[in-house]
Amino acid sequence: MRQAVRRTVDHLYVKRLMNQIPADRLPRHVGILIDGNRRWARSAGYADPSVGHLVGGAKVEAFLRWCDEIGIERVTIFLLSDDNLARSSKEVAALITIVTDVVAGLSDAANHWELTLIGALDVLPAEMAATLKEQTATTAGRTGGVGVNIAVGYGGQREIADAVCAAISEQIAGGATLDEILETFNADMISRHIYTAAQPTLDLIIRTSGEQRLSGFMLWQSVYAEMYFCECYWPEFRKIDFLRALRSYAQRERRFGR
């Protein structure tokens, strides 16, 4: 009985929140750090932290369906950082399996999300990188749902370094000398070579688990993005929590440094 009442109350609250978010105040591009999986597992009494990653992985598809319902154009999901690969071999092995399974589920033919990998795939085990490329390639050209960036083997500092190298290489290929490059080099040249260069500007970053830092997530893109920190662990993240983040975003005045 209590659960039925709770579902009814939650349903009414979702409708209320939806009414408080004007369609013209939605972010086009949302980045999300799905944090707190291990802490959730410990708090739930599990000795194996991979249980948290497993439950958290299963949450991703539900989150994308919320994005579809609301009308979000692009989302970037931080699934695996380059720093995560320094964890214990047992945990890394579990993470690799879970991430690969999550991407396999999202790329299923029944779904309509176009998936794009962002990150340094060369830091991943070769077999995992090849599998992820194959999985996401099958989604090319899909329409009708939110566009999804899968950040795997991702690090914001690495992304900026890669973009700088690519920008300089482009200038050299065009015949510019080092002195000419140094004289004309600017931020726009870097922006053209970041992983998300052809995509909508990042508008909102959400991080679960209560931590209030970016942990290297989209450092270049976040310069004018709004931040929203949610206290709950990712496995507990609800549509209500997502709508609260969107409501907070809609109520803010964005000045873009002006």
Image (cartoon, rainbow, N blue to C red):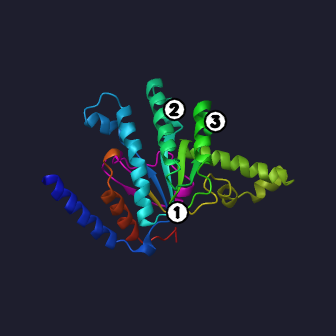
- Tell me how far mark 3 sits from mark 2, CA to CA: 12 Å
Task: Say what secondary structure mark 2 lies in.
Answer: helix
Residue 256, percent from left and from top: 52, 68
Magenta-colored span: 207-234
Amino acid at circle 2: Leu
Where residue 201 sits in the image (x, y, percent)? 56, 63
Residue 52 percent across, percent down from the top left: 35, 37
| Residue drawn 43% across the image and 60% down it | 67
Residue type (three-letter) at the residue carrying disc 1: Gly
Q: Earlier in the sequence, mark 2 or mark 1?
A: 2
Mark 1 or 3, closer to the camera: 1
Q: Nearer the viewer, residue 93 or 105?
A: 105
Badge number at residue 85? 2
The residue furthest top is 89
Label 1, on which residue? 144
Counting labels gives 3
The answer to whether residue 252 is above or below residue 60 is below
Q: Residue at x 44, y 55 (%)?
A: 64
Residue denoted by label 3: 122
Q: Is residue 149 above or below residue 42?
A: below
Of 88 and 138, the residue lying toward us: 138
